[in-house]
Amino acid sequence: MDSGSSGNESLRRKRGAAKAKFRRKVKFFHAHVEKESSSEVLRWIFEDVEKSFDEIESIHMQLIQQRDSTSMDNEDQYMEMLEDERIEVRCLLDTKLGNKSVKKDQTTVKLKPFDPPLFSGNVRDWPTFKETFNKLVVPQCGKEPYALLQCLESEAKKLVRGVEDDFSAMMARLEEEYSHIGRILESILRDIRKLKPISEERERSNTHTHTDRLCVHGRDNKSVNNNNTKMIRV
């Protein structure tokens, strides 16, 4: 197998993996439509669908640049099929958002789009994050696991791995890890210890500098007094 064929095979495998990811996101979206999840949750999932489709398209473009014209039709059909699935999800999202809008108008409730608060695992940020999440996200999305997951990053997101579909279990883990006052105090003490104290050498240096200045000032005054004395004698 030459290097060109090997490269094509590698790209096809990557595209296949990206396609599996895309299909998984589409399935996840349909599941949340069935659950009648909130508009914000559906938007977030659709963003993941879009990102996974873009990933396929990027790999696909690399692949077709290395293929001959006789195989282009098959490659086009491959992407057209996935494009149809993407459009179907987009139309379903628009329909659901339209229905939600009608219901909001009927109840005179109009909620503004918002950027979700983010929590990465800094224990001192937990109280503020929790309060903001309960005030901002829960009223719009309810206790939706995906909404909470979208607000987590880094260590906090790793902590809830394995229970991402259970809001109560996710929140319980976060509470256990970040809500203890002792952990907050430990974090503060760690930061205090990181502050570099002024070294004794620096203190001595500052003291010597101040003393030297006083000595110079004293010598200057003595010199002036001597000159005045000489002038009086004359």
Image (cartoon, rainbow, N blue to C red):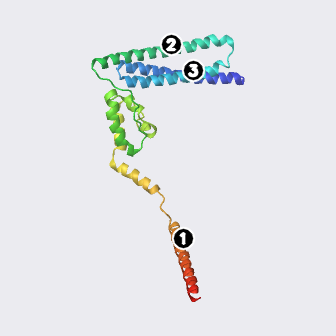
At label 2, the amino acid type is Asp
Residue assigned mark 1: 209
Residue tagged 3: 57
The 10 Å Cα crowd at callout 3, few under 14, some 14 to 19, many 20 or more, is some
Report the side of 90 relative to 66 (left or right): left
The residue drawn where x is 58% and y is 86% is: 230
- Which tag is nearer the camera, tag 1 or tag 3? 1
Q: Secondary structure at mark 2?
A: helix
Query: Taking the image as drawn, is residue 204 in sight?
Result: yes
Q: Is residue 210 above or below residue 155?
A: below
Q: Nearer the viewer, mark 1 or mark 2?
A: 1
State the mark number for residue 84: 2
Residue drawn at x 36%, y 52% is: 185
Q: Dot 1: few (<14), some (14–19), or many (≥20) neighbours within 10 Å?
A: few
What whole-number distance in Å separates the C-alpha atoms at marks 1 and 2? 78 Å
Q: Earlier in the sequence, mark 3 or mark 2?
A: 3
Task: Specify the amino acid type for callout 1.
Answer: Thr
Identify the residue at image location x=40%, y=22%.
Answer: 42
